[in-house]
């Protein structure tokens, strides 16, 4: 079993920056890819960013490219989402997800590909 706990959400103003953290616990022989998804009020959950275990494969949603950066620290079992120049449309609950895989250089952008999910952290961006 893998447990994921997100933190770092909050209320910020448009143009501000915020870094979300996802800490993973639980033993696994896999080399998990990690992803961030978000769900805005009244909308479905959507992909934001993903990173491979080796940090050599990335993908971002078009809406966050050039503003968000995903990175990870495998020693700390953590993945981060650095969010810059936040916009009101970034308001959402942000979820961390883990994809158990042995392909250490593969990232995944589809929700159904992920095996474990965190409980989410709320980000509110005021205009």
Image (spheres, rainbow, N blue to C red):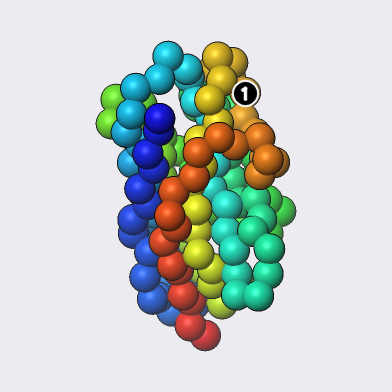
* Residue drawn at point x = 62 percent, y = 30 percent: 107
Q: Can residue 51 be seen in this view?
A: no
Residue sitting farthest toward the left: 76
Count of numbered circles in the view: 1
Q: Which residue is drawn at 38% across and 64% down?
A: 9
Relative to the observer, which residue lies in front, 3 or 20? 3
x, y percent for residue 120: 44, 57
- Whether residue 59 is visible to the viewer of this picture, yes or no, is yes
Could you say whether the residue bearing mark 1 is in a helix, strand or loop? loop
Crowd rating for badge 1 (residues with CA inside 10 Å; few <14, some 14–19, many 20+) = many
Quadrant in the picture for residue 28: top left
Spot the residue most to the front. Answer: 1
Q: Which part of the image, by quadrant, shows the N terminus?
A: top left
Identify the residue shown where x is 37% and y is 52%: 6
Residue 51, x across and y down, in percent: 54, 34
Q: Which of 29 and 103 is in front in this view?
A: 29
Please name the residue shown 56% across and 77% down the image. 88
Q: Is residue 123 left or right of residue 61?
A: left
Say above or below: 82 vs 108. below
Left or right position of 54 against 103: left
- Most foreground residue, 38 or 29: 29
Vertical placement of 99 versus 30: above or below?
below
Q: Quadrant of residue 3?
A: top left
Picture coordinates of residue 99 (x, y %)?
55, 31
Residue lying at the far bottom of the rendered structure: 127
Q: Position of residue 66 (x, y in %)?
A: 60, 52
Residue annotated with mark 1: 106
């Amino acid at each position: 079993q893998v447990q994921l706990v997100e933190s770092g959400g909050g209320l910020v103003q448009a143009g501000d920056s915020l870094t979300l953290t996802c800490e993973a616990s639980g033993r696994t022989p896999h080399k998990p890819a990690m992803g961030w998804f978000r769900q805005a009020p009244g909308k479905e959950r959507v992909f934001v960013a993903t990173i491979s275990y080796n940090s050599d494969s990335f993908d971002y949603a078009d809406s966050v490219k050039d503003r968000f950066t995903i990175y990870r620290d495998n020693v700390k079992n953590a993945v981060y989402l650095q969010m810059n120049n936040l916009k009101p449309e970034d308001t959402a609950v942000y979820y961390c997800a883990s994809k158990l895989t042995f392909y250490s250089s593969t990232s995944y952008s589809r929700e159904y590909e992920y095996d474990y999910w965190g409980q989410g952290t709320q980000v509110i961006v005021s205009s």
